[in-house]
Image (spheres, grey):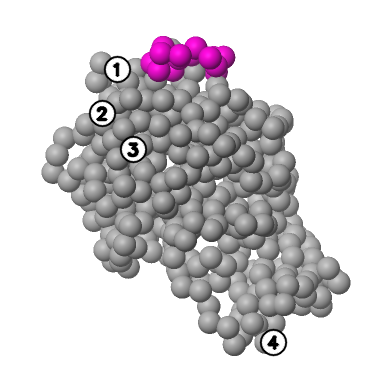
Amino acid sequence: MTRPLRRTVLALTLLLAGCSAFVPQGGISDVRGRVMSLSPPKPLAGIRIVAKQATADTYTDKNGEFLLKDLPTNWQDIRVDVEGYHPLVRRLKVEPYGTKYVDFSLQAAGTPLPKPELLFERNGEIWNTDRLGMRQTQLTGADTWQWRQPVWAPDHRRWAVLGINLSPRAAEPPGVWLSDGDAGPVRVAALPATPLGLSWRGGPFLVCLDGPGMNQGMGRGTMLAMVERGKNVRFLSPGNGEGFPNLSPDGKRIAYTVYSGNVADYLGTSRRPQGRTQIVVANHGGANARELTAEGDNLDPAWSPDGRQIAFISNREGGAELWLMDADGTNQRQVTWTRAKRANNPCWSPDGKSIALNTSFKETFPSPRAKSLWQVALATGNLAMISNDAVTASW
């Protein structure tokens, strides 16, 4: 019987990490990083790195690099304030079993800051920020609710999010919630099982649900469903491990992943060995499913703003890297060459020139998923950090 996809992803990330379980080394740890000027691009030397709980003054070297030692393993605000530049603060969780990495990219003081346009999840709450991570604002704060997978509407005036009540006396089931701008989210649909993924283009919500306990007479793996306000949940897949759903910009197609040997029977093909995760495209209702990938494990499909390309994560060359392909599965090409052990959640910028994703290529601590949010300029392949501890971004 197919295992739930979330276990598959955990197994995949541990396989990529090539490591056994790690044991925390105590209540203190280190943070290393770099301070760079954006205009002109250059490292900034002799810059003081301010952390409230630091035990000693720390400054950047000639390469703009620094090492903050012996910080308590909790949430920290690390600040860089340089004359002639906008100040920048990074909020991060100091890890007890590895050194955290943080990039500071400073913008000249006379240059307007970019507008906040990225939503992301941090520690069960929803935040927004700009493409440089300069200004970060927490948008939720309900103690008994955990918020996951924020998604902008096409007009960027509203955003949807998955909500799960963590109270031991929780009477409300998980659901899809909707926020009008900066207002707090309001429930618009209840869900019959724990949600693991969300995609939305302003109409019906496409969700991934954890299968066990659903009692729908289907498979017990993860499955896809369409949800509308005031209507019953409509299941789109048999529950054989389908996940990571993403609606095309016109809402007419869905891209998602499928897992295990059952998938070959489901799609009517057997050109792939069992135990792999591959990307499938189907129409809005789930029919006419067609597999687009075959080599390695391929996850997290994300449509480009014009619907002509799909970004995804693949380990076919050894590391977890960002790849692109045309919407029909042709012209598959590698974008990043980081040799990262974990990568996930690619999302396109509205202009289609950049992709934000979580990647662990600078992380030295083990985790089931990458926690650092970076952006890739597609014209050059260059990466720039947006934020630490920021996952499932929506641009």
Q: Residue at x 23, y 39 (%)?
A: 227
The three-letter amino acid code for the residue at tag 2 is Phe
Of pointers 3 and 2, the one earlier in the residue sequence: 2
Segment colored magenta = 261-275
Residue 187 position, x and y percent, is 23, 51
Closer to viewer: mark 3 or mark 1: 3
What secondary structure is found at the residue carrying circle 1?
Answer: loop
Secondary element at tag 3:
strand
Which comes sooner in the sequence, label 4 or label 1?
A: 4
Tell me, yes or no, whether the two marked residues, 1 and 2, touch with CB atoms within 8 Å.
yes
Which circle marks residue 235 in the picture? 2
User: Which is more foreground, mark 4 or mark 3?
Assistant: 3
Residue neighbourhood size for the residue with mark 1, other residues' Cα within 10 Å, grouped as few (<14), some (14–19), many (≥20): some
Mark seen at residue 253:
3
Callout 1 amino acid: Met
* Quarter of the view holding residue 127: bottom left
Which disc, if any, is residue 290?
none
Residue found at x 72% / y 59% = 31
Examine the rendering and report whether any part of residue 80 can be seen.
Answer: no
- Which quadrant would the C terminus be assigned to in this image? bottom left
Q: Is residue 158 positioned above or below 20 on the image?
A: below
Residue at 66% in and 46% down: 336
Ranked by sequence position, the earlier of labels 4 and 3 is 4
Q: Are marks 3 and 2 in contact (CB under 8 Å)?
A: no
Give coordinates of residue 140: x percent, y percent.
37, 60
* The stretch drawn in magenta includes residue 266: yes
Left or right: residue 88 compared with residue 194:
right
Mark 4, residue position = 83
| Residue beneath disc 1 | 218
Chain-order first, disc 4 or disc 2: 4
What's the distance in space between the residues labelled 4 and 2, CA to CA? 56 Å
The spot of residue 217 in percent (x, y) is 25, 16
